Amino acid sequence: MKKRNIKAILLAPVISTLLYSGCISTSGINNNIFTAKESKVLSVTAENEILIETDKISCFDSLNIAEELMQGRNEKSAVINVIHKDDKNLQFRKEVALHDDGHLELTIKMKVFPSIENTASNKISYSFQIPAKVLNGMKFKAVCGKAFKCKPLEGQFTENSKILQCRYVIFEDEKKSFTFDFNPAGPYSSMDYPMVGEPTGYWDIANEGQYVNFTLACAVRYYGTVFTGKVFIYKGAYDFAQKHSQKHWCYSTNNSETGFFRQFTFGTPAVIKMFEKADCSKYSPEKKWGWTKTDALGIVRSDRSAITDNCVSSQNGTANEFIMDAPTGVYVLTLRCGHNTLKTGPFNISINGKNAAENIEIPAGETKTIDFTEYLKAPEKQIRIGFSGKSTWAVRSIIAQAVIFQNEDFSVARKLWVMDKLFSPDIEYKK
């Protein structure tokens, strides 16, 4: 794509500024941590100090070429959208959302149209610039690389530092800290390259003198492309595991198991590798797990150490709940139930107060495995697994597998854009 062709098409763009109802002001938006200027060029301050000074797309002299600048708000966020849609070569939409909980969300989506002038050597990039003096000298901890082999990287950010293929990075010193999440959908999304407009999973960071450039680049071939980037910025240092349910994702169907959030055994004589020994422990905020009460519980232990040969039981069926503190998100829960010497049931299981299984009966000495799914949504912060019945119930193990955290979910809980019903440079499907 040649810059002069784009300019020729847009010598006199029509500029319109529209305001949604409920916007904060005509000068910008803020959420008490970040402030974004109402401008086509990105300008962000963090507690009155410049964080992002400017941004650019490589084939334009300035993002002021965009036709539309719109500010608005929904229930939980103040939003600025910049839209460039009247170009026959490249369209883009940029959205900056300042969420009331204190974080910033930046989304950029570009559509390059097919052209015989585009070759494999052409690259188009979007980047935003942070003054180097903001980050110089800070320590950083990053997660870098492709989805199947994400690796940690840490050091001190200096004048010539580069962090390539960065998915997640924390910058911190004694006075301040910021977390940048370039793969908020999580590595499970496997988006290492542009695919049907979904966000690409990593960006490059390079200290280049006056500015540190945070760049998303894409090769453009003759058939054009759509590529997208999304960044969450948090004030403060957040560990990768606090925001993402999986550390990496394997493309191979033969080796794509996801990790476990928590695994508990009940009644085993010793601790089992990779499991926590829960037994009759009462819940405490320090442990972040345990039973609501313990007076009607008893350990049933055999001379064998296997998980399925031991249990914790309530012989009179007294209702109880096993509690786990957990980030909001989708979980697969696997329960192994059964008693060493007694028939169990009929008993019921509930998940966060909702009936999940009823009238379960298990012969003495046997084990029944029961799977559930639970979408724990904010403001809830606990998974509560309830047991109740008219007679004995017993549990041998509980496994909680985090499939996706709620903040990673751009398919069910929410969509790509914070503000819907606006132009988006998407792929067009024609019948």
Image (tube, grey):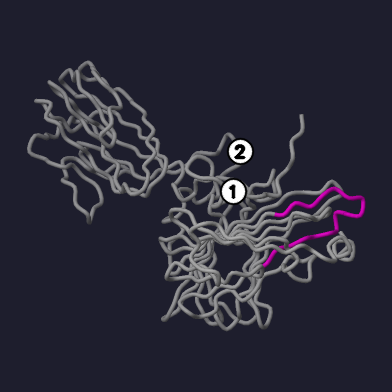
Report whether 276 appears left or right of 27: left
Q: Image point 69% across, 62% down: which residue?
A: 16
Closest to the observer, 287 or 426: 426
Quadrant of res 302 = top left
Where is residue 56 drawn, in percent x and y?
A: 71, 68
Q: In which quarter of the image is residue 367?
A: top left
- Which quadrant: the C terminus? top right
Distance between the Cα atoms at labels 2 and 1? 9 Å
For the residue pair 12 and 169, the one nearer the viewer reads as 12
Amino acid under label 1? Phe
Residue type, numbered disc 2 = Ser
- Determine the residue positioned at 30% across, 22% down: 368
Q: In which quarter of the image is residue 373?
A: top left
Above or below residue 202? Residue 27 is below
Residue 53 in sight = yes
Magenta stretch, residue numbers: 110-127
Q: Name the residue under label 1.
A: 148
> Looking at the picture, does residue 44 appear above or below residue 335?
below
